[in-house]
Image (cartoon, rainbow, N blue to C red):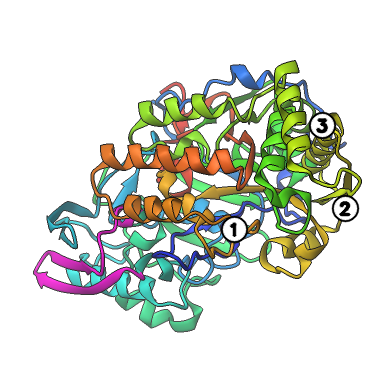
Amino acid sequence: MTHSTPSFRSPATAPRRTWRRTAPVAGAVVAALLAAAGCSGAAKPAGSGPAADASKLTLTPTTPAATGELAEARWLLEDEPDSLDLDTQGSSAGRVVLTNVCERLYRLQPDMTTKPFLAERAETPDDRTLVLTIRSGVTFHDGAPMTADDVLWSLQRHADPDMEQGDEFENVASMKKTGEKEITISFKAPDALFLKALAGDAGIVWNRKQVEKAGRDFGTPGQPDACSGPYRLANWKSGDSITIERHDGYWGDEPLTERVTFRWATDSALVNALTTGAADGAYAESPNTAAALAGKKGIAQYYGPSTSSLVLIPTARGGLKDPAVRRALSLALDRKGIAASGYGGMVQPWSTPVGSGAWGYGKPVFEAAARAADAVAPASPDADDIAAAKKLVKDSGVDAGAPIVIGADASQGRTVVANAVRAALQRIGLTGRIKTVPPAQFEQFYSDPEARNEIDVLVGDWYISKADPVGFYDNALTGSSNNWVGFTDPAYDAMVKKALATLDDAERAKLAAGIQEKFTDAAVWISVAQVPSVLVLDDELTGPPASMAYLYYPWAADLGAKKG
């Protein structure tokens, strides 16, 4: 997913921001990098590298600490940001840059836990009140001190319904400055995920004067940033590059790397630039890119926790409207084969719709729940699984002669998944037909119910922006815009509502495990694989997090040389 995709709101409860991952936009500006390296020729196509064993991928949140300083790092994005105002354009490309420049009230750590940051302390005098104490001594890049007024103004800007983070505030009743360093937020109902939202873009603190001075031009090339982070925005040459530089007046620890220059590339161009040494690193959004770089000399790869997953999203149009048939398909699907053939072993067969990076708390509970879900979503189906699936199909009375239409685009991964779905349907006595559409039309499946009238299941992918599985499961609430199959269960709805209002992490984890069990048993969505975060890096460099935290954590501040 890129974060430029919209959030999808669930009407049955306070909306939660969930995100869909999309294919990166084609087109790149890497000519300068490649020319500087004096290279020519094409790299291997993405996914043509040796297949890894997905079951043996070790997910680590961090890389070894750097000890040496670095004058400049050349970093690749998969597309150019539309804007560096994350309130108006929340793209992942913009976030990878700006997370080193702009700080948040809470910070998402590499291990996907959260902690207070620009808010030095948070107190909850009751379950509907949050009191934030603002950190002293923080200055913006123009030298102005950060004040509680800046914090309140920033929160109010984020809360605007027209802004990217507006839905995070729909449960907020009021926000007030209640002291020189204090903001008090009152809620309409207890909100378990709000603090996690403050570790995301809803927690960015802007320099109000800078934003208002720039007006509508804020976030565009030629405008300064309005933040307090370890780096400042030095230059944005539209269509060419973005440069950030270490801020000498930073209130916190000084980064080892003085400057980071970002350019953008996709697919083979990105692989080529990294292979030739024309670029120093990238967070690879595509597993196929990681597969193409596997084993390349001079390049280290690190795999970290992520909330991303590959999923099948059924509709209520045909045979998959029956939960028994959905369960049968899940039992018969060869997830291990999909991981090897479609993604070079860079994804892991997975039984839940949320990647393990969402386990920012209650990890033992979520691990046990995932193991239990393996029974309905095996990595490789055995004879007993196929027999059970065939019986489910037979007992359902579904019309075996009516083809189940599988929506996909022509990308390698989705093509492999679609063919695996068709093969699984054939194994259990059903017929599958693949409908391949152009990428632009594929995107309409997510947003346009009429487009989905032509398919029975979509080969999709998804991630959530918070390290909490509860933030995903509102997708199956009665009436949710993402509940395409029309699943309805009052007990499920009540469990989700209760979990969203449960502030105690241990209790919420237990509730989430029960919600997950209902979701997977009903196969509202069918999980295929989890997609780890992948950091590819010149093997003389180290330090940044490998986890999905790189979207919200100042990863460049940890980057440096292995040797001092």
Q: Residues within 10 Å of mark 2 (few under 14, many from 20)?
A: some
Q: CA distance from mark 1 to mark 3?
A: 25 Å
Q: Nearer the viewer, residue 478 or 178?
A: 478
- 365 left or right, relative to 17: left
> In this view of the protein, can residue 243 be seen by the observer?
no
Q: Nearer the viewer, residue 560 or 123?
A: 123
Q: Is residue 192 above or below residue 350?
A: below
Of the 4 image quadrants, the one containing the C terminus is: top left
- 153 left or right, relative to 63: left
Report the residue at 82% width, 36% height from top. 425
**Residue bearing mark 1:** 483
- The numbered mark, 2 or 1, whose residue comes first in the sequence reads 2
Q: Position of residue 348 (x, y in %)?
A: 62, 28
Q: Position of residue 459 (x, y in %)?
A: 74, 47
**Magenta segment:** 170-196
The quadrant holding residue 130 is bottom left
Going by the numbered disc 3, the residue's amino acid type is: Ile
Q: CA distance from mark 2 to mark 3?
A: 20 Å
* The stretch drawn in magenta includes residue 175: yes
Q: CA distance from mark 2 to mark 1?
A: 21 Å
- The numbered mark, 1 or 3, whose residue comes first in the sequence reads 3
**Residue bearing mark 3:** 428
Going by the numbered disc 1, the residue's amino acid type is: Asn
